[in-house]
């Protein structure tokens, strides 16, 4: 994480502030800029613009620090305010951030910053030596109607660009920043109007290309066994028909091999009673 420290020069900042920071674990965990560490000119506006976090020592007011905090706010960079115990600080600072840390001495400051500063993200870049995948995630559901042994299958709309008019179970792609089971429940409500659905367990993990074999079409999916006591389905525009059928009958209407595989796993587990 790139961190810029701003402060007044009306205290012994090099001994009380700079030296403890450089000698702490923070120095190895983050890329830290201390603006008065040398006599060389630095473009603090540009450095702040490219920072992930600004830490402002506000025990002593400073015009220069006020200007830098204005830039920080304009750039939407998060701010942590730190101040020494007993210092009187301006209440107007709360308009810029609610993150305040009071400290007793230099070591206490380091300890508190170590806890409160988020650690930098690991290196997730894709390289030739480490080709990290980027792909869509989907969730599917074999929904069992409680106490009947029947499952729900749906007929896709003929207007869809992917397997139009075919029979399937419920599937949906997971949104960015959404966990899989939350996304599955959202899809079940949006596509079927089902709110009270119990997720029992994972049936199968699978991998396909939703179209031609290229990165933007690559998809990893997880199919779950679910249960519902509500047989009243409200279809979205993605489907035109539905049926509650015994799994052995439902699979005969399925064309797609992957969906057949999901149902085969469910049938096998159903026969030996794992889902019960």
Image (cartoon, rainbow, N blue to C red):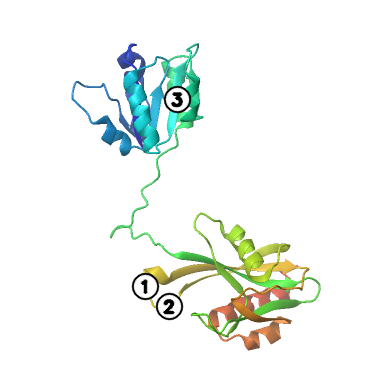
Q: In the rendered structure, find residue 211 and report the number of the disc placed on it.
A: 2
Quarter holding residue 67? top left
Relative depth, front residue between 36 and 208? 36
SS class, disc 1:
loop
- Residue underneath mark 1: 214
Q: Residue at x 70, y 66 (%)?
A: 194
Which SS class for mark 2?
loop
Q: Residue furthest bottom?
A: 252
Residue at screen point 43% across, 38% down: 119
Give percent across and percent down for residue 261.
Answer: 58, 79
Q: Is tag 2's residue or tag 3's residue first in the polypeptide sequence?
A: 3
Question: Residue 33 at x, y = what percent?
Answer: 30, 29
Distance in Å between CA atoms under marks 2 and 3? 51 Å
Asked if the residue at tag 1 contacts the one at tag 2, i.e. Cβ–Cβ closer than 8 Å, the answer is yes
The residue lying toward the viewer, choosing from 10 and 118, is: 10
Could you tell whether 184 is left or right of 13 in the image?
right
The image shows residue 104 at horizontal and vertical percentages of 48, 14
Answer left or right for 200 relative to 81.
right
The span from disc 2 to disc 1 (Cα, nearest Å) is: 8 Å
Q: Secondary structure at mark 3?
A: strand
Q: Is residue 23 above or below residue 131?
A: above
Q: Is residue 36 above or below residue 158?
A: above
Residue on which the image places disc 3: 81
Seen from the viewer's position, the closer of residues 14 and 66 is 66
Q: Residues within 10 Å of mark 1 (few under 14, many from 20)?
A: few
Using the numbered discs, state the Cα–Cα distance from disc 3 to disc 1 in whole angstroms.
47 Å
């Amino acid at each position: 994480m790139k961190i810029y420290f701003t402060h007044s020069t009306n205290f012994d900042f090099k001994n009380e502030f700079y030296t403890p920071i450089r000698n702490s674990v923070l120095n190895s965990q983050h890329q830290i800029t201390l603006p008065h560490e040398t006599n060389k000119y630095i473009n603090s506006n540009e450095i702040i613009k490219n920072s992930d976090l600004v830490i402002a020592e506000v025990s002593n007011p400073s015009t220069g620090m006020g200007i830098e905090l204005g830039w920080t706010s304009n750039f939407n960079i998060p701010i942590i305010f730190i101040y020494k115990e007993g210092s009187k600080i301006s209440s107007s600072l709360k308009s810029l951030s609610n993150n305040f840390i009071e400290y007793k001495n230099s070591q206490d400051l380091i300890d508190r910053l170590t806890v409160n500063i988020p650690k930098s993200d690991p290196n997730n870049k894709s390289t030739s030596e480490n080709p990290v995948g980027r792909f869509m995630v989907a969730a599917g559901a074999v929904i069992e109607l409680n106490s009947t042994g029947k499952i729900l299958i749906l007929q896709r709309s003929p207007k869809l660009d992917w397997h139009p008019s075919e029979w399937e179970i419920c599937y949906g792609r997971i949104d960015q920043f959404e966990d899989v089971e939350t996304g599955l429940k959202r899809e079940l409500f949006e596509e079927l109007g089902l709110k009270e659905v119990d997720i029992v367990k994972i049936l199968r993990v699978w991998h396909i290309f939703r179209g031609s074999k290229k990165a933007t079409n690559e998809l990893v999916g997880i199919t779950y066994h679910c249960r519902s006591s509500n047989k009243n389905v409200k279809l979205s525009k993605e489907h035109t028909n539905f049926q509650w059928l015994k799994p052995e009958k439902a699979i005969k209407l399925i064309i797609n091999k992957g969906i057949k595989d999901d149902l085969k796993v469910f049938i096998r587990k159903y026969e030996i009673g794992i889902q019960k």
